[in-house]
Amino acid sequence: MKRINEYKRLFEIEGALELAPLKKKYRLLVKEWHPDKFPDGGDKAVEAEAMSRQVIDGYHFLVSIAPETKEANLEEFTETTTTAMIDDLQHKGLRLEVTFTDGNTYEFFGVNKQLFTKLLNSDKQLRFAKRKIFNTCVYRKAKSGTKEE
């Protein structure tokens, strides 16, 4: 959640996330912080390089969690979470990374340690995750792929 809020602040987004205003702000920030604007080098060039990377990373991250993106990929997400089994779980902070047996990996945000512990201790992890995580937490697709058997 910290990452989401940090990027929303960078792009001056309050409330719902919409792609059109995000894209407009992205273009303005890229122009403002493009490293080529500081050909002399120095501290400003280093700062511009770092900000440029942060703007690009933030844009791609926010696009991946935007409602329009999630809606466009809902069919694939639903198929993965209903037909594939959980292959691996990684939890750090409030982020849960779930790798499925079909090779897709999704990140879920806002999963605290208590919820993660309940998931681990559940005798039916996939069922628990469907009820408490998959349909309630902000998520994004981290990796895609089909696992070879």
Image (cartoon, rainbow, N blue to C red):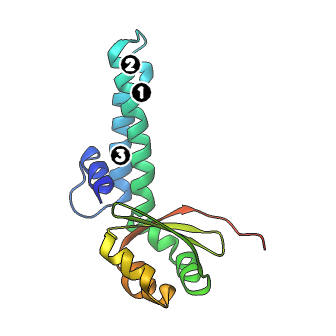
Q: Is 30 above or below relative to 126? A: above
Instruction: Please give left or right for residue 37 compared with residue 8 in the image.
Output: right
Tag 1 secondary structure:
helix
Q: CA distance from mark 1 to mark 2?
A: 6 Å
Tell me: 129 left or right of 93: right
- Residue annotated with mark 1: 49
Query: Disc 3 marks which residue?
Result: 24
Amino acid type assigned to the residue bearing label 2 in the image: Ala
From the image, tell me which residue sits under label 2. 45
Numbered disc in front, either 1 or 3? 1
State the CA–CA distance, disc 1 to disc 3: 20 Å
Query: Would you say 90 lies left or right of 3 here?
Result: right
Of 103 and 44, nearer the camera is: 103
**Amino acid beneath label 1:** Glu
Dot 1 or dot 3, earlier in sequence: 3
| Residue 86 picture location, percent across and down | 57, 78
